Image (cartoon, rainbow, N blue to C red):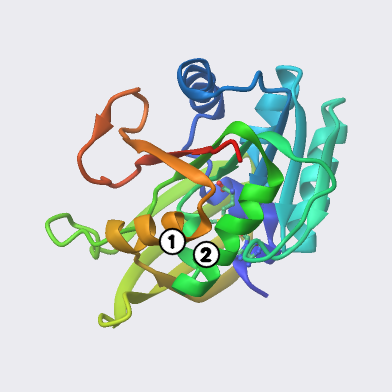
Amino acid sequence: MSIYGEPLYYEIAFSFINPSRQINLFEKFIKKYSKVKPVSFLDIGCGPSPQLLELAKRGYKCTGLDLCPNMLKYLTLKAKETGLKIETKKADFTNFTVKEPFDFTMMMMGTIGYIDSTVKLISHLKSVAKALKPGGLYLIENFRTVRSKEHFFSPQTWMIKRKNILIRVFYKIDIKDSVNGLETETILLEVEDHGKKHLFKQKADIKIFSPIEFFEAIKITESFEFLGWFNRETLRSTERPKIGNYTLLRRKYE
Ligand SMILES: C[S@@+](CC[C@H](N)C(=O)[O-])C[C@H]1O[C@@H](n2cnc3c(N)ncnc32)[C@H](O)[C@@H]1O
């Protein structure tokens, strides 16, 4: 089974983030750039979404969209355990519809890379445009782009423990097809759960869009204003998208 089929282990492996600080920053982005007062949030490719749990705690209406049923079940359960309510929707984020548009949409943790062609990116942006109210924001975390000068290809490894579960994570990216900007992402989890060992490995193609390709896709959809690439944890925009950037789009009025 893929790592995304193991929500608890995935959540622990990537639990180095601080959702409360992230949401504080999102609220600052909203104050500065959103033209709608946000009530409803959609997390696209939500996984176990600690961000939606934090938003729900703050009183917002939250929905998580993912293709993986285990992730959605886990998120529903976690919300229930803490007395919160989070709606879920099983759908492919390259082509989806929602009943009512949201005030704020987001895609976290480099998930954008799983959109592996420009055609799919355009279809994704069209879906998000229909799922977002005019004036609302679409925040993309870690837009993946060509990063020749950064240590993008160095393998990473880390270890994380929660109670009786210890996880060693190996993460690497290899070039697959540099003409089409395709890379192979490998994630390996070595899990020790109450003394029992398990190994999970996942390989996936990810697409590295150049900023020009991204702008072209935005232009074709005719639905978004590009507000900038922002540094993690600040409201400062940068000239080019750095690792861990927040990319901010605003839904245009028709
Ligand atoms: C990198 S994880 C991010 C999870 C979570 N948002 C986070 O920040 O940790 C990517 C998520 O996207 C989901 N996913 C991958 N491809 C998808 C697709 N085509 N449609 C919907 N969800 C997808 C996976 O199941 C997984 O939960």
Identify residue for label 2: 122
Image coords of residue 30 (percent x, y): 53, 22
Query: Looking at the rendered structure, which numbered label has been put on residue 217?
Result: 1
Q: Work out whether residue 196 or residue 116 is closer to the camera in this orientation and state it.
A: 116
Query: Looking at the rendered structure, which numbered label has been put on residue 119?
Result: none
Residue displayed at 28% across by 60% down:
212
State the SS at label 2. Answer: helix
Looking at the picture, which amino acid does disc 1 mark?
Ala
Ligand 1 under 8 Å from disc 2 Cβ: no
Residue displayed at 87% across by 34% down:
80
Kindly indicate the quadrant of the structure image that contains residue 23.
top right
Rendered position, 42 above or below 182? above
- The mark nearer the N terminus, 1 or 2, is 2
Task: Pick the quarter of the image with the N terminus.
Answer: bottom right
Q: Work out whether residue 242 or residue 16 is closer to the camera in this orientation and state it.
A: 242
Toward the front, the furthest residue is: 254
Image coords of residue 118 (percent x, y): 45, 71
Residue displayed at 68% across by 65% down:
95
Task: Pick the quarter of the image with the C terminus.
Answer: top right
Q: Can residue 203 be seen in this view?
A: yes
Q: For ligand 1, give the image quadrant.
A: bottom right
Rendered position, 47 above or below 54? below
Discs 1, 2 touching: Cβ within 8 Å = yes
Q: Work out whether residue 111 or residue 116 is closer to the camera in this orientation and state it.
A: 116
Residue displayed at 57% across by 22% down:
35
State the SS at label 1. Answer: helix
Image coords of residue 183 (percent x, y): 35, 75
Q: What is the C-alpha distance between the residues marked 1 and 2?
A: 5 Å
Image coords of residue 88 (percent x, y): 81, 48
How would you rate the neighbour count of disc 2 (Cα within 10 Å): few for under 14, some for 14-19, many for 20 or more? many
Looking at the picture, which amino acid does disc 2 mark?
Ile
